[in-house]
Image: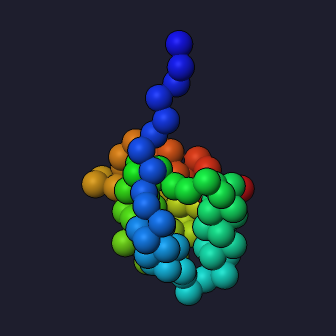
Amino acid sequence: MTEVAAPMIDERALSKLRWRCRRGLLENDLLIERFFNRHPEGVSVSHADGLTTLMDLSDNDLLDLLLRRKEPSGEIDTAEVREVLAELRP
């Protein structure tokens, strides 16, 4: 039985996502860049959705999630966000 590959975003969407993920705090940038480096083949639609949700947060709220000072709650507590956080966290 073969595993079905997750749908990937296209190159243009990936470029836009990388630009959107640029943050004001160096710590956030370093963790996000590490995530992209771990996915040289591209980013799945699911990961892109999770990242997009996280990028709507302020830098400090994002850093709190990345450093496990907080856990996602409310409308950002989705499977996609939790999956991306698991890969982003040190």
Residue 14 showing in the rendered view: yes
Give the total of numbered labels: 0
Identity of the residue drawn at 56% across and 86% down: 24
Q: In terms of depth relative to the viewer, which is nearer, 19 or 89?
A: 19
Q: Residue at x 61, y 73 (%)?
A: 28
Quadrant housing residue 79: top left
In this orientation, does residue 54 appear?
Answer: no
Give the x, y percent position of residue 5: 49, 35
x, y percent for residue 42: 56, 56
Q: In the picture, residue 88 is in which quadrant?
A: bottom right
* Front-most of residues 38 and 52: 38
In the displayed orientation, state which residue is furthest to the bottom.
Answer: 24
Q: Residue at x 41, y 68 (%)?
A: 13
Q: Is residue 62 toward the left or the right of residue 30 in the image?
A: left
Up/down of 55 relative to 89, above or below: below
Image quadrant containing the C terminus = bottom right
Q: Say which residue appears at 47% left-offset and 29% top-offset.
A: 4
In the displayed orientation, state which residue is furthest to the left: 75
Q: Residue furthest top?
A: 1
The image position of residue 18, as x and y in percent, is 52, 73
- In x, y percent, where is residue 14? 48, 67
